[in-house]
Amino acid sequence: MLNDKLKNQLHLHFIVFIWGFTAILAALISIDAISLVWFRVLIASATLFIFLKIKKIPFDEKSGDLIKLFLGGVLIAIHWITFFHAIKISTISTTLISMSSSAFFVVLLQPLFGNKKISLFELLLAVITIIGFVIIFNVEKVHTKGIIYALISAFLLAVFSIYNSKLVKNYRASKIAFYELFFAFLFVTIVLFIKGSFNVSFFELSKFDWIFITILATICTAYPFVVATDLLKKMSAFTIVLTNNLEPVYGIVLAVIIFGDKEKMSFQFYIGAVLIFFSVLLNAFIKNNLFRLRFKK
């Protein structure tokens, strides 16, 4: 039992590490945020469709089920659009750190969804995260617009995580992932069609854009999306979202290595980041020790 918990924790940290590359790829890809999301969900949903067909998993959902999954698809689509847009107009570092506020939103929203009462411990961790975020906001005013978009994205991520924690009780993780990505594709397609964005130039991407988008859609989307959804059966939405706060660690280190001075931030920025990362480590330490005490009993 203890080994299973450790295995799940390691698996979660592995996919968070993979997600650390997402922001890097978004910055390297030359197209705008909404177009990027369209290609991402198209390739990712197609990949999962092939996977489900190979596994001979039936597509027998009722209309009521599809409506629920469609809502999840809309949430994840808007989350990614705002996330990528924040990166495009600010920096990878400020966007990733701002996304850490999602844990605070989870604590506030869970009682509204009827999942659980507010945990004082989780609220304390969320407050530490927000203090770290406020420090960052005060010293990075040049990126205010990007931070606002990242906050919207963080809020949507919190809603999406809580929403999926309910869906996963009744549906297979791989099916949830496929349908939500497919419906995200349909939603973004409608938006682009209304905007009149579909033309010849829309599909004229550079060789490197195609390579980066394919990596983003398969290795950084399809695979971790299924794993993260499945882990919602075994972990709380708060723990998963809070652990996601480690994504900036990987993303910022990679960004500094790849982009150099553009991603180097002020000393106060890193003070705020340390507070945020501390909340992640404290959550893991406390909850793992509580689990060990129960296991010994």
Image: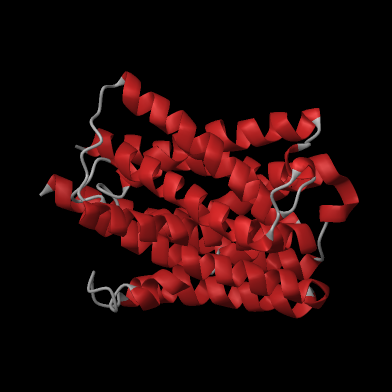
* Residue appearing at x 47%, y 42% in the figure: 13
Q: Is residue 74 left or right of residue 195?
A: left
Asked if residue 94 is positioned above or below residue 42 in the image, the reply reads below
For the question of whether residue 105 can be seen, the reply is yes
Q: Is residue 13 left or right of residue 26?
A: left
Q: Quadrant of residue 165?
A: bottom left
Residue 225 rendering spot, x and y as whole percentages: 44, 42
Residue 266 rendering spot, x and y as whole percentages: 82, 66
* Residue appearing at x 70%, y 34% in the figure: 212
Q: Is residue 123 left or right of residue 142?
A: left
Asked if residue 219 is positioned above or below residue 100 in the image, the reply reads above
Q: Is residue 25 left or right of residue 58?
A: right
Tell me how the rendering is colored: secondary structure
* Residue appearing at x 79%, y 28% in the figure: 207
Residue projecting furthest to the right: 261
* Residue appearing at x 42%, y 76% in the figure: 124
Observer-nearest of 245 and 19 = 19
Q: Quadrant of residue 49?
A: top left
Residue projecting furthest to the top: 54
Tell me how many marks there are. 0
Residue 126 rendering spot, x and y as whole percentages: 46, 72
Residue 56 rendering spot, x and y as whole percentages: 26, 22
Q: Quadrant of the N terminus?
A: top left
For the question of whether residue 236 can be seen, the reply is no
Observer-nearest of 48 and 89 = 48
